[in-house]
Image (cartoon, grey):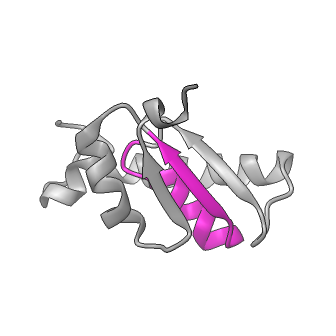
Amino acid sequence: MAGHDDDRHSGARSPNHRTWGKETRYLVEDIGRFLTIGPESSVLDYGCGTGRIAKVLIERYGCHVVGIDTSPSLRSIAPRYVRSERFTVSSPETWTG
């Protein structure tokens, strides 16, 4: 998808690549201001996409992140992008009762 955050995984660079990086840092800073997150914390990232927020949360706070996304293709990209044993990803159907 042109302009989407996962373009860098296909070798392409989107015009929004730099914007996504800056935005991600600001979002993680905001999350950290409102929540106490540390190595013992678990964060649910619903709509995780490629895992861009999860990756920075883990790098900054050392927390565990469970990513949920409806897209099988994004769920397959996310673990390769995040590259952390502190990250798991699954479909929303896994969490419905």
- Which residue appears at 41% of the width and 38% of the height? 91
Which quarter of the rendered picture does the C terminus lie within?
A: top right
**Horizontal side of residue 19 vs 74, given as left or right:** right
Q: Is residue 52 magenta?
A: yes
Total count of labels: 0
Note whether 91 is above or below 24 in the view shown.
Answer: above
- Residue 29 position within the rendered picture, expressed as x and y whole percent measured from the top left: 71, 54
Judging depth in this view, the residue of 48 and 26 nearest the camera is 48
- Which residue appears at 56% of the width and 69% of the height? 86
State the image quarter where residue 65 is shown: bottom right
- Residue 55 position within the rendered picture, expressed as x and y whole percent measured from the top left: 50, 62
Note whether 60 is above or below 10 in the view shown.
Answer: below
Q: Which residues are magenta?
A: 49-68
- Residue 24 position within the rendered picture, expressed as x and y whole percent measured from the top left: 53, 51
**Horizontal side of residue 39 vs 75, given as left or right:** right
State the image quarter where residue 42 is shown: bottom right
Q: Is residue 36 magenta?
A: no
